[in-house]
Amino acid sequence: MTVDHQPTIFVVDDDAAVSRALASAGKLLGYPVQAFESAAAFLTGYDSTYRGCLVLDVKMPGMTGLELQRKLAADGPTFPSS
């Protein structure tokens, strides 16, 4: 069963100031925003019943945004399509 959540913007950035700015912009546009300080935090905290988009920092310690994108693509669709 898929829960019907409003599309959400997921921000993954290790820079707190950038993360806050992106979250504020998303909220001003009327979208719920969930921010994560790392790719690992996103992977453990993401609820797969939520639809939305990812805004990823390219350079982060540990797993970069590009590595997270590759992992999500290799693991198959994790974002519900509707």
Image (tube, helix red, strand yellow):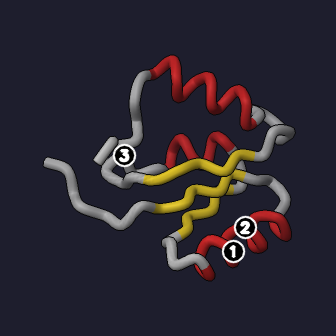
Marks 1 and 2: CB-CB under 8 Å? yes
Task: Give coordinates of residue 34: x percent, y percent.
Answer: 55, 64
Q: Quickly name the residue at label 1.
A: 25
Residue 28, above or below 41: below
| Residue located beneath label 3 in the image | 48
**Residue at image mark 2:** 22
Residue drawn at the location 46% of the way across and 53% of the way down: 52
Give the residue type at disc 2: Leu
Q: Amino acid at mark 1?
A: Ala
Q: CA distance from mark 1 to mark 2?
A: 5 Å
Left or right of residue 70: residue 22: right
Local packing at callout 2 (Cα closer than 10 Å; few below 14, some 14-19, many 20+) is many
| Residue pictured at 75% horizontal, 72% vertical | 20
Q: Is 14 placed above or below 66 here?
A: below
SS for callout 2: helix
Circle 1: is it few (<14), some (14-19), or many (20+) Cα within 10 Å? few
Q: Label 3 crowding class (10 Å Cα cut-off): few <14, some 14-19, many 20+?
A: few
Give the farthest residue toward the top.
Answer: 74
Residue 36 shown left or right of residue 13 in the figure: left
Local SS, label 3: loop
Circle 1: element type? helix
Of circles 3 and 2, the one toward us is 2
Residue occupying the point 55% across, 68% down: 33
Q: Are marks 3 and 2 in contact (CB under 8 Å)?
A: no
| Along the viewing direction, whichever of 25 and 70 lies nearer the viewer | 25
- Of the numbered discs 3 and 1, the one sitting upstream in the chain is 1
